[in-house]
Amino acid sequence: MRRRARLVPIITLVAGSTLLPAAVAHSAGAAAAGPQPIGKEAADSTTEQRTVRRYWTEAKMEAAQPLDALAPKKDAVRLTAAAIAAQTAADPVSVPATSPAGDGVTVARASAAARASTGSAWTRGGAITTTAGRVFFTYQGRNASCSGNAVTSDNGSTVITAGHCVKMGGAFHGNWVFVPGYDRGDRPYGTWVATTLYTTPQWNNSEDINHDVAAAVVAPLNGRSLTDVVGGQGVSFNRARRQQMHSFGYPAAAPYDGSKLVYCAGRAFDDFLMSRDIGLNCNMTGGSSGGPWFTDFDEGTGLGTLNSVNSFKYGFAAGWMFGPYFGTEAQAVYEAAQGTDTP
């Protein structure tokens, strides 16, 4: 069923740097200023959801290919001190992680001893193995893959990913599903079909790499919401840059094959070339796009606070991955998604 994109009213989080209880994450703020996120209805009926779920056979998932590599446009705006000041002008906001039971979970601050990685398989278990997953969709007639992550939300049904993982080349993707805990073809927590897709107006209008952020609202499965099954990671906005971070994803281009969860870890740095993004030493390839970046990631519990996503690499610097700064625009996308009812 084809529908037009629509503008969606946004409610912001409470201003301040304190941790917000999950239950009041979006309910006590004023309306956000500036352009609103763009939303597109996807499979919003049970018949459509059944059709999409049946579409994704094991063979189609295994054959799905990552999208072409992204890069900043030639007229891209570089990061400046003024841009950093503008990004961090808003009060930082953090929403806590939640367990499948719906309880708030305290995320321990990462220790300095966290092991660096530039693209190793994640083998230490924890919550990240249930909240992170592969994203599958149809793009211009071919099946493709990205990555995503379930986060704490009022509707219990919100997945954060990259803008180009929901829309690219002027059109929203079709047959969009999220498979949390994907492992070598196994789908231990099911296949979750998107009912609504959101992205920033900057990505929607001009594919601005600095705002390559998106969220998907997924339909309940067997009468349960997504985070009731897999839990939800915390999410934060307007934080300081250059943090110790962990990124995760399902890279599917060589030398990876999309079969397992991979991670990178280290100190983030500012892009000094052609974007306002943050960077990380990371060898992950196509298919990892949309995978979560965490601050305060606890390698013991697998819990952290989502604060960016895998977005792009420069062709001449394969060892660097870049992700958008999570400011007010990303916050607005999250708010739109978590405030959307599921069918």
Image (spheres, grey):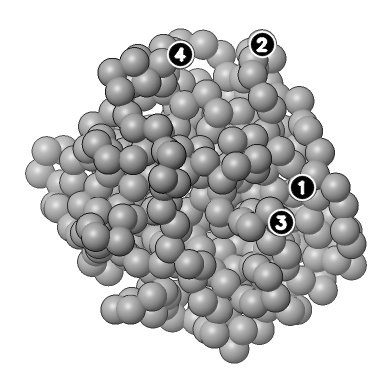
Q: According to the image, label 2 marks what residue? A: 30
Going by the image, does 269 lie left or right of 249? Answer: left
Q: According to the image, label 4 marks what residue? A: 90
Front one among 268 and 126: 268
Query: Three-letter amino acid code at disc 4?
Result: Ala
Distance from disc 2 to disc 1, alpha carbons, whole Å, reads 24 Å
Q: According to the image, label 3 marks what residue? A: 171
Q: Earlier in the sequence, mark 3 or mark 2?
A: 2
Q: Position of residue 170 (x, y in %)?
A: 68, 53
Residue drawn at point x = 24 percent, y = 53 percent: 320
Residue drawn at point x = 73 percent, y = 64 percent: 174
Comparing labels 4 and 3, the label whose residue is closer to the camera: 3
Going by the image, does 163 lie left or right of 28? Answer: left
Mark 3 secondary-structure assignment: strand
The N terminus - image quarter: bottom right
Query: Three-letter amino acid code at disc 3?
Result: Ala
Distance from disc 1 to disc 3, alpha carbons, whole Å, reads 10 Å
